[in-house]
Amino acid sequence: LAKSAKHDVVIIGGGPGGYVAAIKAAQLGFNTACIEKRGSLGGTCLNVGCIPSKALLNNSHLYHEMKHDADKRGIIVGDVKMDMDKFQGAKNKIVKELTGGIEMLFKKNGVTYYKGNGSFEGEHQVKVSPVENGVKEEVLIDAENIIIATGSEVTPFPGITIDEERIVSSTGILSLKEVPKKLAIIGGGIIGLEMASVYSRLGSEVTIIEFQPAIGATMDEEVAKTTQKFLTKQGMKFKTSTKVLGASRNGDKVSVEVEGVKNGKKETLEADVLLVAIGRRPYVQNLNLEKLGLDVDKRGRVVIDKEFNTKHPHIKAIGDVTFGPMLAHKAEEEGVAVVEMLKTGHGHVNYGNIPSVMYSHPEVAWVGKTEQELKAEGIKYKVGKFPFMANSRAKTNMDTEGFVKVLVDAESERILGGHIVGPSAGELIAELGLALEYGASAEDVARTCHAHPTLTEAVKEAALAAHFKPINF
Ligand code: FAD
């Protein structure tokens, strides 16, 4: 006979959506359980996504700076070399500490953690099945409320077999044992370009193959163009408007067949490693959604209403498994909102104010509307721009590529969007997110005293440029 348990809130999936929802639910007084089958908490983000990728990005950036830029700063460092074992080890240590940290937070907040696979047994029943190093026997949980937070998985490329050695997904590329001489990447989105940055800094010849005429998918077009220029200058090769027909492994090499979208010209590219990074799709395998007749749409997303409810209102879904941008902070916001909804009947996520960041160097970050969106919506707007070249802190840091661009309503000057390509763009964008949330105008930001010398002054000056004229440019 299976063991049984009873909880007010049961969350299936321990990623940024699920673990945040679990902690919040426990904090609000619910008897809460979280089921995770991976063996460690934190989901895609902490285990094979945001966190390991940022560890590799930061350390590869430092390596590149020391090897190629130290001299111009008057620092003599001698022969700079890579130790791939240690490089990977540093990343693994960070992942372990952070995922372990969530387990501590569960304990601190009184969340029950089931290491196992969760699936629906009935409308109010969830079964936890054993996984390696997890629960030893089945547990049947009686749940008043259930939150599906099972996330997403890599979208496969039809006809290309991922072996995670030579033909890799975003998971395999994070754990390469050596730097490939030639790296080909299918997909010029954020994940593809971040990994392109890591390995190009470590010495790989990187070619990015993108079906669309431009990289960066949802970026502001001007920013996407500028970004491509910077990355090209760093040595990456771009094959845009190019369709991948197939790829195969021959020993230690991979051949990729491509065709020009416009001219139909066929070509075979040779690489040591091929990264397939064409996106992610919702993950609902082994959940037994069918048992309850829960719907997924054409793209596999669990169908919910504006309050996260599936057709059974006590069963809700958040994060990558449902609608909206597949981002960790979006999942986290939903994790809080869905639980507040349970507690009070109200919970809110502002989907118009979810920042995106690409952690290349320079970084690219944006929030709110792009110029192309404002044009399509017929909204009259003004642009304020300020280059980092004219920012004193960027100058002292010898890191002056890029600009801040602020889009404001033509009449009220209310901030509608912010786009930054430049040093620490991912940090700087928070100011424009806050401005957007509070309905601030360009003048509000421009009249706020910013510390000198800081990169944030570029945000202030861009706002000033939108309102009147910048001082330092
Ligand atoms: P997930 O993190 O996918 O978590 C879902 C969890 O549910 C998984 O751990 C899974 O094992 C578990 N699960 C699934 N089914 C079951 C089941 N039946 N029973 C028990 N457990 C189950 N986002 C950012 O915001 N910033 C970044 O810098 C960033 N970088 C990324 C880099 C890479 C390489 C990748 C791949 C992704 C990146 N993302 C980034 C996206 C981010 O990881 C996701 O948006 C985020 O993890 C989604 O959170 P989630 O909780 O919805 O799902």
Image (cartoon, rainbow, N blue to C red):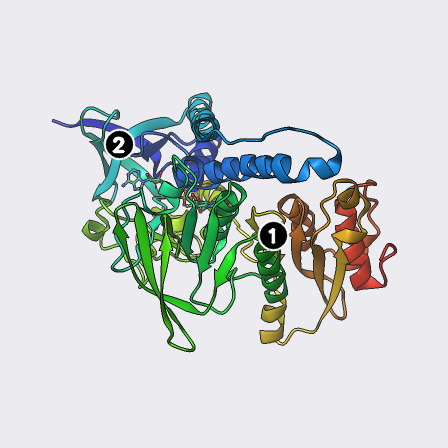
The crowd level at tag 1 (other Cα within 10 Å; few <14, some 14-19, many 20+) is many
User: Within the displayed image, which quadrant is ligand 1 positioned in?
Assistant: top left
CA distance separating discs 2 and 1? 38 Å
Q: Earlier in the sequence, mark 2 or mark 1?
A: 2
Which residue is at the front of the view, 23 or 210?
210
Which residue is at the front of the view, 464 or 8?
464
Query: Mark 2 and 1 residues: CB-CB less than 8 Å, in contact?
Result: no
Residue pointed to by mark 1 = 364
Q: Is residue 346 visible?
A: no
Identify the element where label 2 is drawn: strand
Identify the element where label 1 is drawn: strand
Which residue is at the front of the view, 79 or 107?
79
Residue at the front extreme of this rendering:
79
Amino acid residing under circle 2: Gly
Report x, y in % for residue 340: 49, 42
Cβ(mark 2) to ligand 1 < 8 Å? yes
- Asked whether, in this view, residue 271 is left or right of residue 212, the answer is left
Report x, y in % for residue 4: 21, 27
- Viewport quadrant of the N terminus: top left
Report x, y in % for residue 426: 62, 46
Report x, y in % for residue 45: 44, 40
Q: In the figure, 158 relative to 138: above or below? A: below
Q: In the figure, 259 relative to 318: above or below? A: below
Amino acid residing under circle 1: Val
Which is more foreground, mark 2 or mark 1?
1
- The label on residue 116 is 2
The residue under the point 63% across, 76% down is 378
The residue under the point 43% across, 28% down is 85
